[in-house]
Amino acid sequence: MISVLIDKIKEKNAPVVVGLDPMIDYIPKKMVDDAITEQFGALEAAGEAIWKFNKEIVDATYDLIPAVKPQIAMYEQFGIPGLIAFDKTVKYCKEKGLVVIGDVKRGDIGSTSAAYANGHIGAVTIGDTEVSAFDEDMVTVNPYLGTDGVKPFVDACNEYDKGIFVLVKTSNPSSGEFQDQMIDGHPLYELVADKVNEWGMDSMDGEYSNVGAVVGATYPEMGAFLREKMPNTYILVPGYGAQGGTADTLRPYFNEDGLGAIVNSSRGIICAYKQDKYKQFGDSKFYEASRQAVVDMIEDINSIF
Amino acid sequence: MISVLIDKIKEKNAPVVVGLDPMIDYIPKKMVDDAITEQFGALEAAGEAIWKFNKEIVDATYDLIPAVKPQIAMYEQFGIPGLIAFDKTVKYCKEKGLVVIGDVKRGDIGSTSAAYANGHIGAVTIGDTEVSAFDEDMVTVNPYLGTDGVKPFVDACNEYDKGIFVLVKTSNPSSGEFQDQMIDGHPLYELVADKVNEWGMDSMDGEYSNVGAVVGATYPEMGAFLREKMPNTYILVPGYGAQGGTADTLRPYFNEDGLGAIVNSSRGIICAYKQDKYKQFGDSKFYEASRQAVVDMIEDINSIF
């Protein structure tokens, strides 16, 4: 799967991913109000508003970008109707030719991790029927439980040609509390990076492995170090834009050839119409603001090469 | 919420929780086949079979036990229909007076963790309506992202009188890969335990805090150590039975008064009818096998006091 993502990044000349993380506040008020009027329940209204909002953004940007990253928490908070919106979004984005990275950060013990892997990037068997439920192309994985929690995801990568990104160093302020702790002179995230290399050896797909890593844009020195430490690992970089990461801090996450990393922006794209810079589009053309924000982001990221 | 759980444990004299983690293989074949015949899609059939299976087990055991712990991965693997079965199971168990511990192991950065917390143990607001989606009583939480990933769950505990169990030392074979790594002479899980104490101080509910810990039954020395280290923390203990933990290794997880821990069994209860010991119940009375297995488990656990 990583080779598919790389081909799309090259084709669009855009090492970026749009994070589809719709908070209710991000959606134009009229869209939410209309959904409340049309739907019987509040959760159903939220699901419908999110789905319509996503669809407009995807329609306005899909030709520019290789991938999207829906954050499942933003859907799961609205229960079943929210998850139906997640499911529709994943399937619609795949129809549009986008690589879908489910930001699910799952991770559990062996058979339970296998269930997550089956449901998100594999398949389940019921009677004589094999079915893929959510069927994202790639997902994010939490490594705290160790190899037997991650291995089922790697197995699914091999069986179904999918990919994962393992949390190595996250973008949030307190990520260092555990991740930066020193073990025999090396931070915990480095130990996780060693494991990412090891797991990735079992799922190579061209020059890179299907086992990628999440390294936040907010920690560029660690990005530089981890880039070198994991030569065959694609890095998913959250934290650009709203969280404070800027293009000039992103260079170290990439290899010489401009590959090796893909930068996520969520709020900066899907909520662009609320920024002064894009306010001329107005609430009703929020998706055109998103398109312009994608154009600007691609130009900004490509300026570092 | 922890005080509610403790009251129920005392009332039933049963420091146990039944893990509702239904694999398709655990469900009697006839139930699965019937669901396949009745339902249009394979995922819908899985959801229906799981729900019916769970309901029988809950009906046969609810008077004996204080709590259940549905493992969401086992539902999520079947997509939306699976999650509908999860949702129905949670709501039904609450109707039956059980404390529901959603084994979701969620954890993310601040606003995203807040979305998970809102969806599972809090509420969301859409227009003028506040709604709780999955509405479990307690959930398990992954701490790898640090305080700002856990804090939103603690806030929800306080706002909605709920509880969490933070993964400290998990029961799986490779849990030590990261969790046992030594930091200044102390393993990582001890550092997490210190944080559990700290987080718990913000959400005390009687003698114990609403911030519990997961410590696997398969590591009893660490259980003893962590019991002492976290005096106000309830410990959720997975790994009894099928994973290899036995009653005589469980004593150290409890305080002198017999409180302080709750022991989970999943396969050992819900799949009891497949064991030689309970095979006299047959496939059709699988739920009576589960009831007997609960009776035996409670007796076994209580024998240590």
Image (spheres, coloured by chain):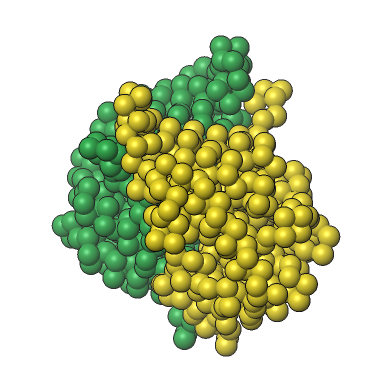
Chain colours: A green, B yellow
Occupied quadrant, residue A297:
top left
Instruction: Using residue A14 as the reference point, say whether residue B249 is left or right of it.
Output: right
Residue B116 location (% of width, % of height): 58, 44
Residue A273 location (% of width, % of height): 53, 28
Visible residue check, residue A27? yes
Residue A115 location (% of width, % of height): 38, 50
> Foreground: A172 or B266?
B266
> Foreground: B135 or B31?
B31
Q: Residue furthest front?
A: B280
Q: Is residue A101 above or below residue B247?
A: above
Q: Is residue B184 above or below residue A140?
A: below
Residue drawn at x 44%, y 65% as measured from the top left: B242
Q: Residue furthest right?
A: B206
Instruction: Using residue B154 as the reference point, say whether residue A1 is left or right of it.
Output: left
Q: Is residue A267 above or below residue B101?
A: above
Residue drawn at x 54%, y 69% as measured from the top left: B216
Residue drawn at x 57%, y 63% as measured from the top left: B297
> Foreground: B281 or B106?
B281
Instruction: Using residue B273 as the reference point, say whether residue A244 is left or right of it.
Output: right
Residue A190 location (% of width, % of height): 41, 73
Q: Residue furthest left?
A: A206
Instruction: Using residue A259 as the reference point, say whether residue B136 is left or right of it.
Output: right
Visible residue check, residue B108? no
> Foreground: A30 or B96?
B96
Q: How many marks?
A: 0
Occupied quadrant, residue B46:
top left
Residue drawn at x 51%, y 51% as measured from the top left: B290
Q: Is residue B33 above or below residue B277?
A: above
